[in-house]
């Protein structure tokens, strides 16, 4: 498969971010922060009215988009910036494009967007293909 600078990558869509998955990830990540588990805590802290997705899950969404775009590839480097929260029930879409190609290394720019609120995370990654 050939790639070119400017090529758009196939999007990775999460139709509805799962609060149940947040509970499972809380165990896996050893992250008992109640903002991921208890909507009443989120409300009390003034952070909204739905549980908040863990940051590593958001990063995993972006990694999934990259790995689907480059099957068999390996993420060599990745940098992202958290801009806003992702909440239970959000529809989230990761999009990306090729920014540079050097040998077998493809550098991509990507963003994680939530319907109705725009970009909540953005960054770059280099994938060896």
Image (cartoon, helix red, strand yellow):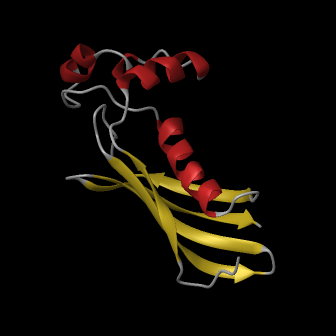
Q: Relative to 51, is 48 on the left or the right? A: left
Q: Quadrant of the C terminus?
A: bottom right
Above or below, 114 relative to 17: below
Which residue is rendered at x = 47% and y = 42% of the image? Answer: 58
Asked where in the image residue 23 lies, by quadrant, the reply is: top left
Image quadrant assignment for residue 70: bottom right
Where 4 falls versus 44 (above or below)?
below
Image coords of residue 123 (percent x, y): 51, 61
Q: Residue at point 38% right, 54% down?
A: 93
Q: Write down the quadrant of residue 65 in the picture.
A: bottom right
Name the residue: 45% across, 32% down. Answer: 54
Residue 5 at x, y percent in the picture: 59, 84
Image location (x, y in percent) of residue 69: 60, 63
Can I make out residue 83 in this image?
no
Q: Residue furthest front?
A: 1
Compare residues 48 and 65 and report the one nearer the observer.
65
């Amino acid at each position: 498969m050939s790639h070119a600078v400017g090529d758009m990558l196939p999007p990775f869509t999460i139709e509805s971010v799962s609060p149940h998955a947040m509970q499972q990830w809380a165990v896996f990540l050893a992250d008992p922060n109640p903002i991921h588990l208890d909507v009443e805590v989120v409300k009390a802290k003034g952070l909204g009215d739905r549980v908040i997705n863990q940051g590593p899950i958001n990063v995993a969404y972006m990694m999934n988009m990259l790995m689907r775009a480059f099957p068999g590839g390996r993420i060599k480097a990745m940098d992202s910036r958290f801009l806003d929260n992702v909440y239970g029930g959000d529809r989230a879409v990761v999009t990306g494009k090729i920014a540079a190609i050097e040998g077998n290394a493809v550098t991509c720019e990507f963003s994680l967007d939530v319907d109705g609120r725009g970009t909540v995370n953005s960054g770059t990654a280099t994938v060896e293909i």
